Image: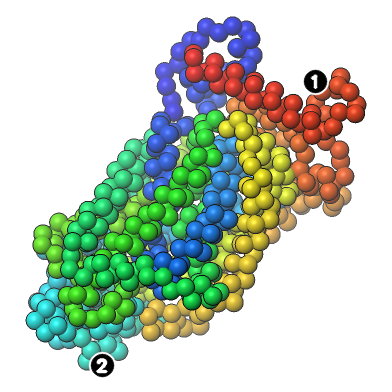
Amino acid sequence: MDVPKQSLNVCPKRAVLLSQFDPLTMQREDGKKQRATWNKQIEFILSCVGYAVGLGNIWRFPYLCYKSGGGAFLIPYFLFLLICGIPQFFLEMSLGQFASLGFVAVWKISPIFKGIGFGMAIISLIACVYYNVVIAWSLYYIYYSYSMPWSSCNNSWNTPNCVSQDDSIKNRMGFLNSTQPKDFLSSSLNVSKMMSSEEFWLFHVLRQSAGIDTVGALQWPLVFTLFTAWAIVFVCVAKGIKTSGKVVYVTATLPYFVLACLFIRGVTLPGSWNGIQFFLKPKWSKLLTFKVWGDAATQIFYSSGTTWGALLTMASHNKFDNNVYRDSLLIPLVNSGTSILSGFVVFSYLGFMSYETGKGIEDVVAQGPGLVFVVYPEAISRLPLSAIWAFSFFFMLFAVGLDTQFVKFESIVRALADEYPTFFQKRKTLFSAVLCLLLFVLGLPCVTQGGIYVVQLMDWYSAAFSLMFFSLFETIVVAWIYGVDRFALDISLMIKRKPSLWWKLCWCYITPASVTVLLLFIVINHTAITYGNYKYPTWSIVIGWILATCSIVPIPTVAFWTLVRKKGSLKRRIINSLRPTADWGPASEKNKNLYKKSTNVVSSRFGKAFLKEKPVSMQNFTEKSNNETQENRAKQFLYSIRSESETVFSISKRD
């Protein structure tokens, strides 16, 4: 944050403590600009909540909860939140806030693993391509919210098999099973009935082809909405957190207002409580199934937003003394609470749909695009003032998707600017514009007639295994190579207290072990990609696996290149590549000095076990008795660090 420069009248002692950093000007005395920070802490929290709460909270969690045991599913869900989600969240946010670096440059902590940062950039770029297509679909539905053509069968794209809400009410025919997207050709051959909302989705919005082999023509209305979506993303990130920090006041809070309104309206509808009971009714026998536990862990892992790099980058804009511990507890809990609220909303309307159509709830439940672009529009069209509800719902989808999208995009730009400051720092806005245009072009295959198959392919494979690998490497590097005690002391420099034993156990053992088991679960349960009843050809599966591996390839590639550039024997090269670089540490000089002193007291497990090197004592401890234990000396040093840092921050606040 840039503020007018002011003069400070401080005593020499204060000047020494403040070192080269002026907290009011956000500049160092050497003339270099300090990293921009959030104007208000609420902007950071809203940005993190908006990023973590994505479309998966709305269209995947409710279905997964219903399928995996209802209320019983919440037991493994919250267990994995406790042992995997929150510890990983705490680790990433602490790392970003401590170093004030993006997710590539932050690997100065152990340069041989910098490939993880580049892998995060690749997977985020792939996700940005297809995620913005979903936002484009939402914009398309927003445009049609006033007329709601999906509610009738009197349109040019409708077939003789179309069933509208009026027909279903008259005949109580309802909808045949629409739980998954269907191949419309086979549906037509079987002369089965199809909802008007489904025909609008398949025949008008997507104009869906028979498969990925026949991509077909570009759908120009979707091309326009996709371009609009990218233009909005660019506007949101044009000036970094200065603009995005303001946007989240709307995009992060509006979805909760809309969800609350939809919930209040939903529970007043006939049949809604049957749907909610169906959602929450525990099926305890499901807990004996290994797949339910695996699904719970997978949902926590993907919905929390960790290991994409965005959380780490957002935390890098925090002030050094921000209470990262509080934020790391609050945001995941809000995220999980949103998933549960979405489940109540979704199943209240599914219960209403079941009542209206005379079919069982299990026959109208859906997930993914089939829920938000077929079932929900049909349910909303049956409400009074349906146009208002339709606009509110699709604008909520747009806001939820936009939050995640622009945070992910901004983190990519910020990470590259941190890693290559001489090239990107002065051209950040231009680079953002060029990258938006490039990703728009790459997304064009997703808005063809076969675009839905392309989106499914990218979503299925892009993050299939790579996020798990990133998580595993993160915890190993921080807890074992850098050193969990050293990392805990780094956190204590920020929040004035060391993390408890629980967090150390999670980072060292529980979380990496859980991620390893989860990786095995995914490998064992992996199936070939499908879209409803459609099976993908072999060549497309090969492309999918290329997408899955392209974000992992940088890890060994960069590691090899790092070793090649080092000098000395192979052992010495490995040692130097595993150690933090000379400039690793906090951004400001005062905090970096405290950090450098702390490294003399607490060494990493790697330094103790592999290098067999003894930690070097601090100069101001050398006069003490030789029989004083290292543990007591570390405690005394930590106390002195706290006292000195508290003095610095209190001076900053008073001045």
Above or below, 494 relative to 149: above
> How many residues crowd mark 2 within 10 Å: few (<14), some (14–19), many (20+)?
few
Q: Quadrant of residue 325?
A: top right
Q: Nearer the viewer, residue 189 or 97?
A: 97
Q: Residue at x 54, y 69 (%)?
A: 294
List x then y, in percent, for residue 534.
Answer: 39, 83
- Between disc 1 and disc 2, whose residue precedes? 2
Q: CA distance from mark 1 to mark 2?
A: 85 Å
In the picture provided, is 274 more to the left or to the right than 325? left
Q: Nearer the viewer, mark 1 or mark 2?
A: 1
Position of the N terminus by quadrant: top left
> How many residues crowd mark 1 within 10 Å: few (<14), some (14–19), many (20+)?
few
List x then y, in percent, for residue 642.
Answer: 64, 25
In the picture provided, is 213 more to the left or to the right than 226? right
Do residues under tags 1 and 2 come within 8 Å of each other at their CB atoms? no
Q: Residue at x 40, y 43 (%)?
A: 47
Secondary element type, mark 2: helix
Q: Amino acid at mark 1?
A: Asn
Q: Nearer the viewer, residue 69 or 410?
A: 69
The numbered mark at residue 620 is 1
Above or below, 155 relative to 110: below
Q: Residue at x 39, y 37 (%)?
A: 43
Q: Residue at x 64, y 20 (%)?
A: 644
Q: Residue furthest bottom?
A: 190
Q: Amino acid at mark 2?
A: Leu
List x then y, in percent, for residue 324.
Answer: 53, 38
The numbered mark at residue 189 is 2
Q: Residue furthest right?
A: 626
Q: Quadrant of residue 4?
A: top left
Above or below, 240 relative to 360: above
List x then y, in percent, for residue 54.
Answer: 39, 56
